[in-house]
Image (cartoon, rainbow, N blue to C red):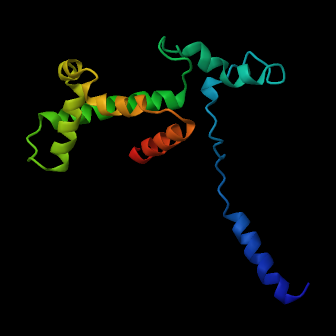
């Protein structure tokens, strides 16, 4: 072996000697597994059976999972933040006051009920005037522009 090949070999061996010895984590949540099911018989039940037994799907939802739970918690957190903003004395025109006022307007259900569909009258009239497929295409484009 030539000397020029020895240096890269020594560097490689040195790197191998410093590799971590801890067992790497896979990222799988094995707590949700069902060890009573053989994976070759039913892989789904093997990997999710434990979670399914311990998790109740809320009656108002057709499915439920980790992302549903995250979304539910995010909704609670945002609601609490906006309630707190609403009680604050943020100065008029500030971002905090704008958010609090917008949120308060959505939560004012008495005012919403009193207004009924009146705020939508212009849009409903625009829809009533649609007569051709081209009208519909223009209206869809218009609505997409509104976001």
The residue nearer to you, when weighing 119 against 13, is 119
Report the side of 23 relative to 82 (left or right): right
| Along the viewing direction, whichever of 7 and 55 lies nearer the viewer | 55
Q: Residue reaching furthest bottom?
A: 3
Q: Total marks drawn?
A: 0
Give the residue drawn at x 10%, y 44%. 90
The location of residue 15, given as percent across then percent down, is: 70, 68
Quick one: which residue is furthest to the right in this view?
1
Which of the two residues, 70 or 116, is positioned nearer the viewer here? Answer: 116
Where does residue 55 sit, x and y in percent of width and height?
54, 16
Please, which residue is most extreme toward the top here? 59
Instruction: Please indicate whether residue 18 sits to the left or right of residue 78 in the image.
Output: right
- Give the side of residue 1 with respect to residue 107, left or right: right
Residue drawn at x 61%, y 17% as measured from the top left: 52
Q: In which quarter of the image is the C terminus?
A: top left
- Residue 7 to residue 116: above or below: below
- Residue 81, quarter of picture: top left
Residue in view at x 79 percent, y 24 percent:
39
Q: Position of residue 77 (x, y in %)?
A: 32, 33
From the image, which quarter does the N terminus lie in? bottom right
Compared to residue 103, the image places residue 37 above or below, namely above
* Placement of 126 over or under 31, stated as above or below: below
Residue displayed at 66% across by 64% down: 18
Residue 101 appears left or right of 140:
left
Quadrant of res 14: bottom right
Q: Nearer the viewer, residue 134 or 39?
A: 134
């Amino acid at each position: 072996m030539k000397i020029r090949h020895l240096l890269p070999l020594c560097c490689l061996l040195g790197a191998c000697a410093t590799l971590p010895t801890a067992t790497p984590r896979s990222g799988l949540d094995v707590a949700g597994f069902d060890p009573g099911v053989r994976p070759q018989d039913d892989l789904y039940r093997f990997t999710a059976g434990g979670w399914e037994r311990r998790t109740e799907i809320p009656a108002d939802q057709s499915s439920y999972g980790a992302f549903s739970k995250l979304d539910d918690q995010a909704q609670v957190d945002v609601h609490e933040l906006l309630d707190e903003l609403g009680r604050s004395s943020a100065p008029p025109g500030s971002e905090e006051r704008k958010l609090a006022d917008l949120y308060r307007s959505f939560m004012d259900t008495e005012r919403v009920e009193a207004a009924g569909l009146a705020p939508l009258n212009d849009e409903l009239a625009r829809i009533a005037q649609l007569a051709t497929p081209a009208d519909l295409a223009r209206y869809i484009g218009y609505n997409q522009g509104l976001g």
